[in-house]
Amino acid sequence: MADELKRTVVWKSLAIDGADYCSLWRTTEGWMLKGTVVGAVKDGRSNSQPLLVSYEIHCDENWLTHRVQLQRTIGSDVKSLTLTVESRGTWRNSDGEELATLRGCDDIDLSITPATNTIAIRRLNLQVASSESIIAAWVKFPELTVQPLSQRYTRVSNNTYRYASNTGFSAEIVVDDLGLVTSYPGAWTRLATA
């Protein structure tokens, strides 16, 4: 089976004054989300800096994360992050070192894109009115630091999920038939899809 493009979306970010171009692929190993975020971020002196982030997330048939590759550029500052998940819950960096703080994390959550909500939504496959708690490996931007983050997804209706994290943040996310965000109040809105 050859890789097959399932859908491409563009989201407008309300936080970084930018956009995310993301493609969902059906691959020989399962699923892949591949995207590019372009925007402007404030530095410590209230100046805007150009931001470019490219990400690629590989999941198996059941939407379990296996590989994550990120590169983020702010001005001339470039940082990269590569993570692999060997067996369920064992995360390693690009040097092969186990990241013990992430042991038991189910999913990847990139704070720079709504694409990673698709992974948890598809993997959990919740029935309407049911909910489940997970722990995600949360990548914060612009630092690219990774830490565990407790989250809860509740399926409110066929295409609406209530997302809540232990940071105190919560939102009702509306998704399409593939689990890609169409509306994320206060954070993202979909501009186009193909």
Image (cartoon, rainbow, N blue to C red):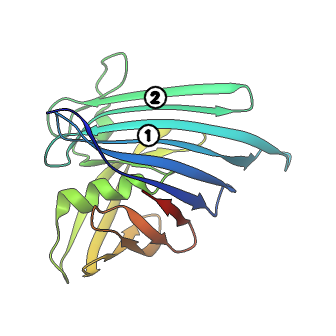
Total count of labels: 2
**The N terminus: image quadrant:** top left
Question: Which residue corresponds to the image point at 61% horizontal and 41% vertical from the top-left?
Answer: 142
Residue position for label 2:
81
Q: Give the label on residue 126, or none.
A: none
Q: In the rendered structure, which amino acid carries the disc numbered 2?
A: Leu
Question: Which residue corresponds to the image point at 85% horizontal and 46% vertical from the top-left?
Answer: 47
Q: In the rendered structure, which amino acid carries the disc numbered 1?
A: Val
**The C terminus: image quadrant:** bottom left
Tell me: 187 left or right of 32: right
Q: Which of marks 2 and 1 is nearer the N terminus?
A: 2
Residue position for label 1:
146
**Classed neighbour count for the residue bearing mark 2: other residues with Cα under 10 Å, few (<14), some (14–19), many (≥20):** some
In the rendered structure, are the residues bearing label 2 and label 1 in contact, judged by CB atoms less than 8 Å apart?
A: yes
- Residue 132 in percent (x, y) is at 21, 68
- Residue 178 in percent (x, y) is at 28, 61
Question: Which residue corresponds to the image point at 73% horizontal and 25% vertical from the top-left?
Answer: 76
Tell me: 58 left or right of 80: left
**Classed neighbour count for the residue bearing mark 1: other residues with Cα under 10 Å, few (<14), some (14–19), many (≥20):** many
